[in-house]
Amino acid sequence: MINPYIKSLKSEKTESGVLYGQFLINSLGLGQGITIGNLLRRVLLGDVGGTSITAIRIAGVRDEFSIITGVREDILEILLNVKGIILKSNKTYPQYGRLKVQGPAIVTANFIQLPPDLQVVNPNHYIATISTGNFLEIEFKFEYGTGYKLASQTFQDKSGDFLQIDAVYMPVQKVDFKIENVYENSNDISERLIIDIWTNGSISPEDAISEASQFIADLFNSILDNKFATEIKEPDTQSLTIAKDGLLTSLNPIEDKADLIKKVLPEPRSPFSTTLSPVLHSDINSTANFADSSGVFVLILDGYLTNLFRLHCNNGQYHLFK
């Protein structure tokens, strides 16, 4: 049986603060290198969490279009500058920090007063310049998460004059890997995986790959701990929803085919013969009075998208088909 092992090949820190590490995973079976490499890369980029600034509140400012007297940057520039601050924390609950500086001064990240469990990785990161003797007072909200989230997804409480910021939680910036074949003396062929990891400095590549490996192990352990499902839940065929132009229309239960047609088609405006066939896996043919129209309809059954139908009118005849 092949016993894989991991070894650190390189560990460097660039002038910008980026941490780089190269690792070797040896003694893999044929085909295991691409499987493990893809899995580690996805988990490193998407599931290793970090702390980011998600909102700020500036004294005397109510929106991003306001102006701060005596400050060179406008609000949008300050928001972009704040977004580049890299934080390190082992806490997952929201935290707050403050900044209060009197000008003239160049404001950087090291002016922020942080909670004890929070640390700024790039303290010299530029925020703004105060050209007069005015005060610049900012309150920061720090949150833990994974991946990247837009401002509308990060901060639910819009009160208190907080300005939302797009949050980049992921500390791993880039992951590359390559696979090499190893030919043994016994004519056996094994694989070795070489993986390169770059982080923003808030976590070391060694800790990142360890956290990713633990996440994968916990995921499969949770699958092993759970029993296999013995019953499969059947979809509720009595509950039906049809979406037309983004609007949902419910039918419950479906007993009358004519009611279904009336739900799908627009209101009648002129009398003529109309034929629908097929609809919802059944042959539905009915005659009713409707105006010329066409469109695309989506069938949602038991909360899941099941089929896409297109409505077409030809010489006064409607045809609703897959």
Image: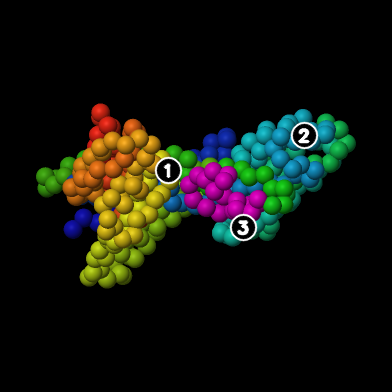
Q: CA distance from mark 3 to mark 2?
A: 28 Å
The earlier-in-sequence mark between 1 and 2 is 2
Tell me, for residue 94, which label it has, or none: 3
Q: Nearer the viewer, residue 132 or 276?
A: 276
Q: Is 52 on the left-hand or right-hand side of 235? A: right
Quadrant showing the N terminus = bottom left
Residue 189, position as x, y percentages in the image: 16, 45
- Residue under the point 43% across and 46% down: 247
Asked if one can make out residue 252 in the rendered structure from this viewpoint, the answer is yes
Q: Amino acid at mark 3?
A: Pro
Instruction: Estimate the x, y position of residue 37 in percent, counting from the top left.
Output: 32, 45
In screen coordinates, is 86 left or right of 263?
A: right
Q: Amino acid at mark 2?
A: Ile
Q: Secondary structure at mark 3?
A: loop
Is residue 155 on the magenta stretch? yes
In this view, the residue farthest toward the right is 133
Looking at numbered disc 1 in the image, what kind of residue is underneath it?
Answer: Gly
Q: Which residue is mark 1?
A: 246
* Residue drawn where x is 57% and y is 34% of the image: 15
**Residue at image mark 2:** 67
For the question of whether residue 210 can be seen, the reply is no
Image coordinates of residue 153 in percent, x first then y, are: 54, 48
- Decide which of tag 1 and tag 3 comes sooner along the chain: 3
Write down the quadrant of residue 79 in the picture. top right
- Which stretch is magenta? 141-158
Q: Determine contact: label 1, label 2, CB under 8 Å.
A: no
- Residue 105 within the magenta-colored segment of the rendering: no
163 sits left or right of 16 in the view:
right
Camera-near label (1 vs 2) is: 1
